[in-house]
Image (cartoon, grey):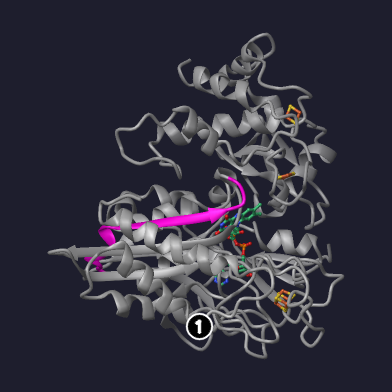
């Protein structure tokens, strides 16, 4: 590991000098430093900032401090009852030990698990711009079918972020140039021809919190994750869904897909196709198809299209009370 | 930098910022219970309790934990009087080669505390459920791998410890 200076952050808007990065739980950053993929000169520890609380917002809704640990958030009563999809997504991720360290901010900003990205000796446009993308011809079994580019087809690995995308969450940001807030669905960017940039954040911008809006439909929500073993593995496909049915028709719905795109994939086309339709498996499959029409699978990841289609129908069906 | 490990205070001088908590425990304090299985958060062999919570010590830079209270497997129980989880592993033969065992035991101690606080797991469906059912123990302990596959006996070992 390359050596670095260490200090604790003192203010929210301090920003970062060139070569410096924020450190939260370290479960992704320290790993990437050991692998030689991340080579910061300075680590600025943000875990001592007063950002470790879950609080109720004045107009309703919940504010999740960016330093709240994944395990604490998953166990929070307000999350378990008001936004069960978020608690379930957190608990489906990593392990008890990792969730005890991992933070809300760090989880959102964790980097892809693409094996070439994680191997400093390999070419990869994300860790070395212009070096090429060996995944396109090589191992892309768990890489993107939606939103990828010629330059990069990485998937975003977070479970939590998929739930947040479905929940219309808003990211609160602070930095030397001031504070701003953006929908979580605008936090991660598609790779285009600059895959080295994962997000819309400027260097030195700090995520201070994630806000969940008042969202009645979220009370009936769920997260389903498919993976290669029963637990302690990243998703190969995941669905976050919230559903409200009235008189047999879909009254309101939120839907997001995980492990299929460079960002948590809010499935707006599917949602639109579903509103007002009968809450049946047939409608759910048709809605998934509406979203997946844009899929561009490669040699070894076409299974994801079928997987997400079926996961969508299964998750929504279960939410109607009709478990299949 | 100060670090309290198993109740004893240590002053670490000249610590390289790159040193993980696991390396401090093993190389500086010669507490070799916690193992370096993968060094990447993937196996749980390095599990210790940090201020009472189970964590992977291989992904924690020691320098980030001034004033922390660390408990390793060496700090559980007393000579001749093992911790209930250690006792459970002995009685139920919860290991084969023993390599993963210190991590399994620390993890189980942390996990039982999480259960006592009512924390849900990925397989918890309702509040009324038995949080120490077999499926619950398996899911909650899934962050600890065992190459020998000694899992079946760990499950009753852990459940029994919860009752002691
Ligand atoms: C073996 C293993 C299995 C895993 N399995 C899963 C899984 O199944 N599902 C899943 O979702 N995740 C999984 N993870 C990933 C884990 O969830 C992430 O590593 C964790 O959430 C990162 O959080 P952290 O606080 O440790 O971040 P860090 O590692 O500290 O930071 C990650 C990034 O975020 C930046 N950052 C952190 N906080 C802020 C902030 N407030 N503002 C701006 N930037 C910030 C850092 O600079 C860094 O770039 C797994 C990890 C491991 C090692
Ligand atoms: S998919 Fe992206 S991260 Fe993976 S090798 Fe290609 S450029 Fe790198
Ligand atoms: S050595 Fe830390 S998890 Fe494997
Ligand atoms: S007992 Fe051998 S690795 Fe678990």
Q: Say if A68 sits above or below A271 in the image.
A: above
Inspect the magenta stretch and tell me whether residue A218 lies in it: yes
Give percent across and percent down for residue B42. 69, 48
Name the residue rendered at 73%, 47% in the picture.
B58
Q: Residue furthest right?
A: A121
**Is A219 a magenta residue?**
yes
Place residue A19 in its image quadrant: bottom right
* Foreground of the two, A131 or B112: A131
| Dot 1: chain letter | A
Query: Which residue does the numbered mark 1 point to in the structure image?
Result: A294
x then y, percent, for residue A186: 46, 82
SS at mark 1 in the image: loop
Using residue A90 as the reference point, say whether residue A115 is left or right of it: right
**Location of residue A120 in the rendering, given as x and y in whole percent from the top left corner:** 83, 70
- Viewer can see residue A73: no
Instruction: Find the magenta span and give its range.
Output: A212-229
Residue A187: x, y in percent?
50, 79
In depth, the one of A244 and B131 nearer the eye is A244
Residue A125 seen by the camera: yes
Q: Is residue B132 above or below residue A64?
A: above
Most distant residue in the front direction: A282
């Amino acid at each position: 590991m390359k050596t670095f200076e260490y200090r604790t952050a003192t203010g929210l808007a301090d920003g970062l000098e060139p070569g410096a990065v924020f450190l939260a739980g370290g479960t992704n950053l320290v790993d990437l430093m050991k692998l030689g993929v991340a080579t910061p000169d300075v680590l600025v520890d943000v875990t001592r900032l007063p950002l470790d609380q879950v609080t109720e917002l004045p107009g309703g809704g919940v504010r999740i401090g960016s330093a709240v640990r994944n395990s604490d958030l998953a166990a929070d009563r307000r999350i378990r009852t008001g936004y069960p999809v978020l608690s379930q997504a957190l608990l489906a991720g990593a392990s008890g030990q990792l969730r005890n360290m991992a933070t809300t901010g760090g989880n959102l900003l964790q980097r892809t698990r693409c094996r070439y990205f994680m191997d400093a000796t390999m070419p990869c446009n994300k860790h070395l711009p212009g070096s090429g993308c060996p995944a396109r011809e090589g191992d892309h079994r768990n890489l993107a079918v939606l939103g990828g580019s010629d330059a990069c087809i990485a998937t975003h690995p977070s479970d939590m972020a998929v739930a947040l995308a479905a929940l219309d969450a808003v990211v609160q940001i602070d930095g030397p140039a001031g504070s701003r807030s953006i929908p979580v669905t605008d936090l991660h960017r598609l790779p285009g021809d600059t895959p080295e940039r994962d997000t819309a954040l400027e260097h030195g911008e700090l995520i201070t919190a994630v806000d969940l809006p008042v969202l009645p439909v979220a009370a009936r929500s769920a997260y389903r994750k498919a993976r290669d073993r029963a637990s302690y593995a990243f998703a190969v496909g995941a669905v976050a869904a919230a559903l409200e049915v009235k008189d047999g028709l879909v009254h309101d719905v939120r839907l997001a897909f995980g492990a299929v795109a460079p960002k948590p994939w809010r499935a707006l086309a599917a949602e639109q196709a579903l509103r007002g339709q009968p809450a049946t498996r047939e409608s759910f499959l048709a809605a998934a198809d509406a979203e997946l029409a844009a899929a561009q699978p490669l040699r070894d990841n076409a299974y994801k299209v079928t997987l997400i289609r079926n996961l969508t129908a299964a998750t929504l069906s279960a939410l109607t009370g009709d478990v299949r | 930098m100060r670090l309290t490990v198993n109740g004893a205070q240590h002053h670490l001088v000249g610590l390289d910022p790159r040193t993980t908590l696991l390396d401090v425990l093993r190389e500086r304090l010669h507490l070799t219970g916690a193992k370096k299985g993968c060094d990447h958060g993937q196996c749980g062999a390095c599990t210790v309790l940090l201020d009472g919570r189970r964590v992977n010590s291989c992904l924690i830079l020691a320098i980030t934990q001034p004033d922390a209270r660390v408990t390793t497997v060496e700090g559980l129980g007393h000579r001749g009087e093992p911790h209930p989880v250690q006792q459970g592993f002995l009685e139920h033969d919860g290991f084969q080669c023993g390599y993963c065992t210190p991590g399994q035991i620390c993890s189980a101690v942390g996990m039982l505390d999480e259960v006592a606080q009512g924390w849900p797991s990925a397989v918890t469906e309702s509040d009324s459920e038995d949080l120490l059912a077999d499926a619950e123990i398996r899911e909650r302990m899934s962050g600890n791998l065992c190459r020998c596959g000694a899992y079946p006996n760990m499950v009753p070992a852990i459940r029994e410890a919860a009752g002691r």
